[in-house]
Image: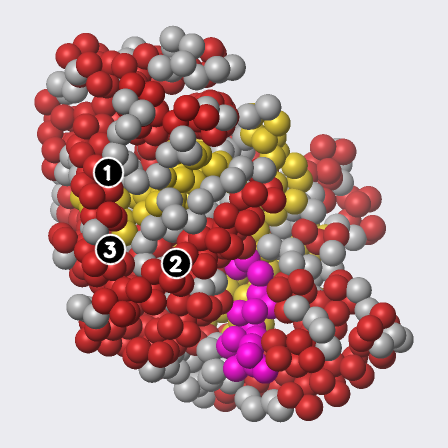
């Protein structure tokens, strides 16, 4: 789309006038932001319509990505960039003395997700549109996003995220596409006059599901896809039907809050209702659409692909069966054939506490018909395979076991493809976690290493780097991230290192300013910015990072002349409100920060900053300023990680265990350009098999570790007696579940080696450049293309 500055300015002024009856000078940032949003929307609305019509006219196979979380962050700049209007609008606004950045701040950060899983879904939405693929999102329009985090006395406090208080300018409410979702009651089967068994429903409630659609703009290709989020509404008429107040309250509030647990399942009824709600609403609306095409039901898989993002939407399988068998009268076998061909599933973890299981009794209450269908799927699964495989294997792989419904089992049995999110993770699924299923369905398993929305994590968050890259390698990388490799032509050019270092320093200044404003802490942009930002989780080992900081602190106290490059350790992390251990780690980091930042005797060599309320917008500020990217999970535990890719793209050097996608980062940048340390996954499994890990031995025999661990209980860190004791116990009494003590010395050595590399400007320059040059490998554009080819069998319709 080509819009001139003049046209834009006229349209903008007219909108402002029509809506608020004011002129530019009198308008507040909020009014200006809202007007700008409206203008942008008007520019893409016809493309949005045409994209939809195109898909329809070509009877194009489309994918529907079902995810209980989406984490798009702010959309203003991303839409401007995609429409090719970012620079023009920036200039136009400057002519009115308006800074675009001020308007950006007006937009609430859309936080309908917890972390990596939801952010991945949003990166995929961006890439699907940008490569012209017919891809739709399907999720929940939570009224409250992920809680806002504040620290009070070093403790995390959670505040509600009332993001809808300001109007969401991007969404469009589509009342006419509303559907009803049925909950509860009893269902029994009755023979119909034609001899078929039909379900008869007794009691229960219907909830109205209203879709809100948001346009997902593609990068300079006139494509606008749709992310559809469902909101629950109870009509006055429905209210009368509620038998009890509790049910009514629960269902009325169905889409009010996002569960704040990351990689952990609470097993609450309300969550199950949310899952069924967005699954049923989405599946019904897809079926309406498909029926409007007038094509045979048995060929649905040629036109529709449905992707199940982790197991939260796994009820897509029985819900489609319900629609095909109960509503469309299809025979079970035919419906099953279509369903498995339509469905595919991504697994995001091997950690057992995150694998969803639902009590049978709960599922019967919430969605009784779905439970019946799952029971039948389970029965047929056993019937089909018990003659082929060891009965014990079949028993282990059943969907219904020990009075629980195993959602991962449902997702595997009911789909034609299951993928992990990085090579190691996908291998572990086959060899350990889902080994039995791999025996039954070897062809279903595949890997799709995660990727990131390259444009957001470079052009939007790091404009300085972007223009520097343009200068050396031209602009093609902006569309095709693989072209970042052109930078390798300058791999030995000191001038380029210097320019990249200059960009980094500017970004560090920008972050230093924010740190000063929000935390009152003075940090030097000449120090190494060492960053760990991600959810707080024991397996991610923020605690090990803290222990390294404590070690450095003690070292400097002992030897004030210690020759180390000054470092600023930066954390960003939310803990699930009920995750006690994680909250203790937050408290300890905050208290350690207080201790170190206020200790004049260490001469500012160390600073520790824990930024509050880490979210997508903050990530856009932090990541471009990082020198070091901490990716230090215990090998085998982090399925992939995606911030590792964002840091690399922004020229940070990764401090990494051989876990998740770190391994693939190492493979593309080479050993010289990454800092690897710690146990390998095979070594971790050896400890498991031999059951001979003993953290107390390490503690007792290694004086360095002994001293650092003691700091948690000997009063070194103030105001944290209880938390310190808990941490100490987790490491010593409970045998250090994530092998921190085992990896600690190796971690410290890698850190020392990194310090030495940083001192050597040319060495560091090359490492940083090499990371940027290879970051295109992890573009979500590439990832999504692979999903499209291998799993969904969809093709680009619009120009990619
Ligand atoms: I399961 N992930 C997440 O953010 N939330 C979850 O509930 C589960 C997994 C994450 C993994 O931990 C990351 O390793 C991965 O990169 C990300 O999902 C996207 O695949």
Residue ID for mark 1: 751
Whole-angstrom CA distance, mark 1 to mark 2, is 20 Å
Q: Is residue 121 magenta?
A: no
Residue 528 picture quarter? top left
Percent across and percent down for residue 708 are 30, 18
Q: Is residue 83 magenta?
A: yes
Whole-angstrom CA distance, mark 3 to mark 1, is 17 Å
Question: Bounds of the magenta span?
Answer: 66-88
Q: Earlier in the sequence, mark 1 or mark 2?
A: 2
Decide if residue 608 is in sight here.
yes
Percent across and percent down for residue 693 are 16, 20
Against 416, residue 263 (above or below) is: above
Helix, strand or loop under label 2: helix
Against 320, residue 799 (above or below) is: below
- Residue at the spot x=40%, y=14% of the render? 716
Q: Residues within 10 Å of mark 2 (few under 14, many from 20)?
A: many
């Amino acid at each position: 789309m080509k819009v001139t500055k003049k046209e834009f300015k006229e349209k903008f002024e007219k909108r402002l006038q029509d809506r608020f009856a004011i002129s530019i000078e009198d308008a507040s940032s909020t009014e200006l932001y809202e007007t700008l949003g409206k203008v942008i929307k008007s520019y893409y609305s016809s493309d949005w319509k045409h994209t939809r019509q195109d898909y329809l006219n070509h009877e194009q196979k489309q994918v529907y990505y079902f995810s209980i979380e989406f984490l798009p962050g702010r959309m203003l700049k991303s839409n401007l960039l995609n429409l090719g209007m970012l620079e023009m609008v920036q200039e136009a606004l400057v002519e009115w003395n308006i800074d675009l950045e001020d308007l950006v701040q007006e937009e609430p950060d859309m936080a309908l997700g917890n972390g990596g899983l939801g952010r991945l879904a949003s990166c995929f939405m961006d890439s699907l549109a940008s490569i012209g693929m017919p891809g739709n999102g399907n999720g929940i329009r939570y009224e409250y996003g992920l809680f806002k985090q504040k620290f009070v006395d070093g403790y995390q406090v959670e505040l509600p995220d009332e993001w809808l208080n300001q109007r969401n300018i991007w969404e469009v409410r589509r009342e006419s596409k509303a559907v009803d979702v049925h909950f509860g009651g009893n269902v029994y089967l009755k023979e119909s006059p034609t001899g078929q068994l039909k379900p008869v429903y007794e009691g229960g409630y219907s909830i109205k599901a209203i879709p809100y659609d948001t346009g997902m703009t593609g990068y300079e290709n006139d494509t606008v896809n749709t992310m559809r989020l469902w909101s629950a509404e109870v009509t006055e008429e429905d209210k009368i039907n509620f038998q009890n107040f509790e049910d009514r309250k629960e269902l009325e509030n169905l889409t009010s809050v996002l569960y704040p647990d990351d990689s952990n399942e609470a097993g609450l009824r309300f969550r199950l209702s949310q899952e069924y709600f967005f699954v049923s609403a989405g599946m019904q609306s897809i079926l309406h659409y498909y029926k409007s095409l007038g094509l045979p039901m048995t060929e649905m898989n040629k036109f529709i692909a449905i992707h199940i993002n982790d197991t939260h939407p796994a009820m897509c399988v029985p819900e489609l069966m319900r629609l095909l068998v109960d509503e469309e009268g299809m025979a079970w076998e035919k419906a099953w054939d279509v369903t498995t061909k339509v469905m595919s599933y991504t697994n995001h973890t091997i950690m057992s506490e995150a694998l969803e299981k639902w009590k049978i009794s709960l599922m019967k209450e919430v969605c009784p018909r779905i439970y019946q269908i799952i029971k039948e799927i389970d029965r047929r699964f056993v019937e089909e395979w018990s003659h082929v495989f060891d009965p014990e294997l079949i028993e282990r792989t059943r969907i219904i076991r020990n009075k629980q419904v195993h959602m991962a089992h449902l997702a595997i049995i009911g789909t034609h493809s299951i993928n992990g999110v990085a090579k190691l993770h996908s291998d572990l699924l086959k060899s350990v976690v889902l080994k039995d299923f791999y025996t039954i369905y070897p062809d279903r398993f595949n890997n799709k290493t995660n990727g990131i929305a390259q444009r957001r994590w470079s052009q939007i968050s790091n404009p300085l780097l972007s223009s520097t890259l343009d200068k050396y390698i031209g602009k093609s990388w902006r569309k095709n991230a693989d072209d970042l490799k052109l930078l390798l032509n300058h791999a030995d050019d000191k001038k380029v290192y210097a320019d990249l270092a200059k960009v980094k320093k500017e970004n560090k200044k920008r972050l230093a300013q924010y740190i000063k404003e929000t935390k009152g802490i003075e940090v030097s942009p000449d120090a190494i910015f060492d960053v760990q930002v991600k959810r707080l989780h024991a397996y991610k080992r923020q605690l090990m990072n803290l222990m390294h900081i404590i070690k450095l602190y003690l070292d400097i106290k002992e030897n004030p002349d210690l020759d180390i490059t000054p470092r600023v350790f930066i954390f960003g992390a939310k803990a699930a409100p009920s995750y006690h251990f994680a909250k203790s780690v937050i408290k300890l980091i905050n208290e350690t920060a207080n201790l170190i930042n206020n200790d004049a005797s260490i001469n500012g060599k160390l600073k520790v900053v824990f930024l509050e309320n880490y979210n997508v917008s903050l990530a856009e500020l932090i990541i471009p300023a990082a020198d070091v990217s901490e990716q230090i999970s215990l090998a085998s535990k982090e399925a992939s990680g995606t911030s590792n890719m964002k840091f690399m793209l922004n020229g940070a050097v990764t401090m990494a265990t051989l876990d998740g996608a770190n391994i693939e980062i190492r493979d593309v940048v080479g050993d010289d350009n990454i800092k690897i340390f710690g146990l390998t996954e095979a070594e971790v499994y050896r400890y498991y098999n031999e059951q001979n890990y003993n953290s107390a031995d390490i503690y007792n025999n290694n004086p360095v570790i002994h001293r650092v661990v003691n700091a948690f209980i000997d009063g070194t860190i103030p105001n944290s007696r209880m938390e310190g004791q808990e941490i100490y116990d987790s490491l010593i009494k409970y045998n250090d579940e994530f092998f921190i003590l085992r990896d600690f010395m190796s971690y410290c050595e890698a850190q020392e080696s990194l310090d030495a590399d940083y001192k050597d400007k040319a060495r560091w320059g090359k490492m940083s450049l090499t990371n940027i040059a290879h970051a295109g490998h992890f573009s979500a554009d590439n990832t999504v293309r692979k999903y499209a080819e291998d799993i969904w069998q969809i093709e680009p319709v619009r120009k990619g």
